[in-house]
Image (tube, grey):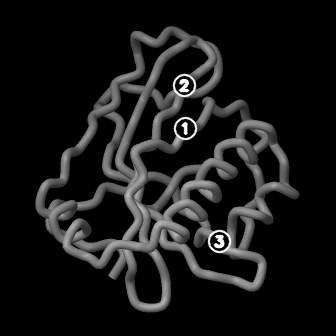
Amino acid sequence: MTTDHIAGHLQPGGHPPGGVRDSADVKVEQHRLPRTYAAFAALPDATGEQTAAVVQVLALYGHAVDNGDPKLLAQVFVDPPALDPATSPSHHTVNTEVKQIPGALAAWSRLVTIAGDGSVASADAVDVLTETPAGWRVHPRHGGPAVIADGQTPWA
């Protein structure tokens, strides 16, 4: 599972991290999005309580996927996706910044994955979260990787 809002893609001839293989063929190009990030950074800050809740939910995402736990996924997503039975890399969501948007929150994070062979890939990920009676939940990361053009606002 990946997010629709990831800035980063495989270079020609590269293979996504996952499973055990030669890490020499993993070629991930990372995108830095200064104009898009500037638009995000200008949004109103979330409260400390909101930020802590979002960071917790995004941490649960990695545990749910890495452990293949559909019950835990229900604590992460508004509409939990099905888990992919294929071996996937270890997921880590770091450097999360949370902003307020109309009726929701947006979180800009660094997504780091570590494959079984030790190869590492990273990308910027933008998640939109909605408050539910059970707490903050992420809108599912369906659709696979997508490139965000600099200056676009995927949370709008």
Q: What whole-number distance in Å separates the C-alpha atoms at marks 2 and 1?
A: 8 Å
Residue 154, image x, y percentages: 33, 72
Specify few, some or many for label 1: CA neighbours under 10 Å numbering under 14, 14-19, or 20 or more. Answer: some
Which residue lies at the image location 34% right of the left edge and 72% below the top edge?
45
**Residue of label 2:** 114
The disc label shown at residue 92, or none: 1
Label located before the other in sequence (3 or 1): 1
According to the image, label 3 marks what residue?
A: 137
Query: As drawn, which residue projects farthest toward the bottom?
Result: 103
Residue at x 30% of width, y 78% of height: 44
Q: Is 5 positioned to the left or the right of 51 in the image? A: left
The quarter of the displayed image where residue 78 is located:
bottom right
- SS at mark 3? strand
Q: Residue at x 13, y 55 (%)?
A: 34
Whether 30 is drawn above or below 126: the answer is above
* Front of the two marks 2 and 1: 1
Residue 73, position in %: x, y?
A: 77, 58
Up the image or down, 13 lies above or below 116; here it is below
Residue 79, horizontal then vertical, whole percent? 72, 74
| Labels 2 & 1 near each other (Cβ < 8 A) | yes
The front one of 98 and 22 is: 98
Residue found at the very far right of the displayed protein: 71
- Residue 59 visible in the current orientation: yes
Please state, as top left, top right, bottom left or bottom right, where the C terminus lies in the image. bottom left
Q: Amino acid at mark 1?
A: His
Q: What secondary structure is found at the residue carrying circle 2? A: strand
